[in-house]
Image (cartoon, rainbow, N blue to C red):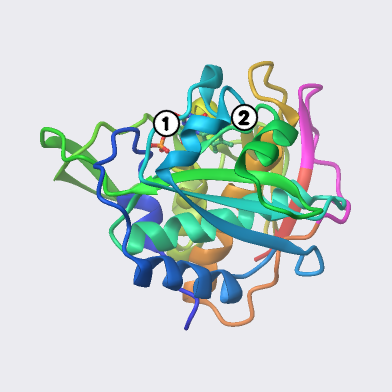
Amino acid sequence: MEYLRYYDEIVSRRQSCRDFADTVVDAASVEEIKAYNEVVPKLLPEISTELHFFGGDVADFLGSSVGYNGFTVKAPNYLALYSEEAPHYLENAGFIAQGLTLKLTQLGFDACWLTVNDAEAAKGALGIDTDKTLAVFIAFGHGNKAKKDVRLDIKSPSNVTMVSCEKKVAPKISMQDLLSYKVYGEPVNMELLYTELEDALLSIAVAQSFFNRQPYRVIVDDDIVSLIGLDDELTTTEDQLLNYGIAMFNFYAVLDSTRAGVKMWSFDEAGRDLKLPENAHYIAKIRI
Ligand SMILES: Cc1cc2nc3c(=O)[nH]c(=O)nc-3n(C[C@H](O)[C@H](O)[C@H](O)COP(=O)(O)O)c2cc1C
């Protein structure tokens, strides 16, 4: 199985779903997700992870251990990614799980990430015998068809069309607010970005995040792109790290679809003065 690059899935199709039909996902599709987990790129391949699938009945046991305000979105299927605890294991788990989420999208399923409020309690409720920690928990299945709605399909800032879609869209940060050039807060001249890079950056702008807070920014330089985290009192450290992993997967997957030999994100030091304000922190960089 080949790893797919997902531009459309990221930018125009994936949205969180909280209203699932009872129909269980067929076994062949679950097998496909499992096989995909073997080939999906990893941020830190040396960190071992385990993927497990569950039926809808586990929701009864989870109590308030997952979900906003302890509310588990009901779905016919769930998946959980467990990870060895090592430096950056949550960014790595977020990265991998985003690949799985986009695979689900590509196969026509809907999904919703559920925040892990109590990893120990959720692990106990799920009953998997593993020494790894629960890192990501995702509800998935067939979304109930809601009334048709119109939304923007943003191929790039200069290529926007209206399409009819079935769900309400969460508003996303604009490219102008997301991006800086060389140092924090310096506007980017969008006309100077070449299309592939613009597409990859847009895929960060539309990424899902805890409560749709998008507490991160991006600094574009001539040779590297740096991901910057912003303090956010509503987002826990764990969800921040998962957010970063998601954003990094989107960018990597889109850039990798257009260029040969794209290097993975690195947690090495920024290596330059990004002039970050106090509430902003350098996270990682990738060569472009
Ligand atoms: C780390 C993380 C945790 C999340 N936890 C929940 C959750 O517990 N319940 C929920 O309904 N949605 C959850 N979401 C989904 C976000 O609310 C959603 O991604 C955001 O509102 C943006 O909407 P979109 O995914 O449709 O773009 C979570 C997303 C992330 C990335």
**252 magenta-colored:** no
The residue at 35%/42% (across/down) is 15
Give the quadrant of residue 195: bottom left
Which percent across, then down, holds residue 246?
58, 49
Task: Tell me: is circle 1 under 8 Å from ligand 1.
Answer: yes
**Which one is in front in this view, the residue at disc 1 or the one at disc 2?**
1
Under mark 2, the amino acid is: Pro
Q: Is residue 184 visible?
A: no
Q: Quadrant of the C terminus?
A: bottom right
Residue 215 is marked as: 2
Q: Is residue 196 visible?
A: yes
Under mark 1, the amino acid is: Val
Which percent across, then down, holds residue 127?
65, 46
Query: 10 Å neighbourhood of mark 2: few (<14), some, or many (≥20)?
Result: many
In this figure, which residue is indicated by the disc labeled 1? 73
Main SS, magenta region, reads: loop
For the record, the magenta segment spans: 267-282
Give the distance between the C-alpha atoms of the residues marked 1 and 2, in whole angstroms. 23 Å
Which percent across, then down, holds residue 250?
52, 56
The residue at 58%/63% (across/down) is 252
Query: 10 Å neighbourhood of mark 1: few (<14), some, or many (≥20)?
Result: many
Q: Nearer the viewer, residue 278 or 138?
A: 138
Q: Is residue 196 left or right of residue 43?
A: left
Which of the two discs, 1 and 2, labels the residue nearer the N terminus?
A: 1
Give the secondary structure at mark 2.
loop
**281 magenta-colored:** yes
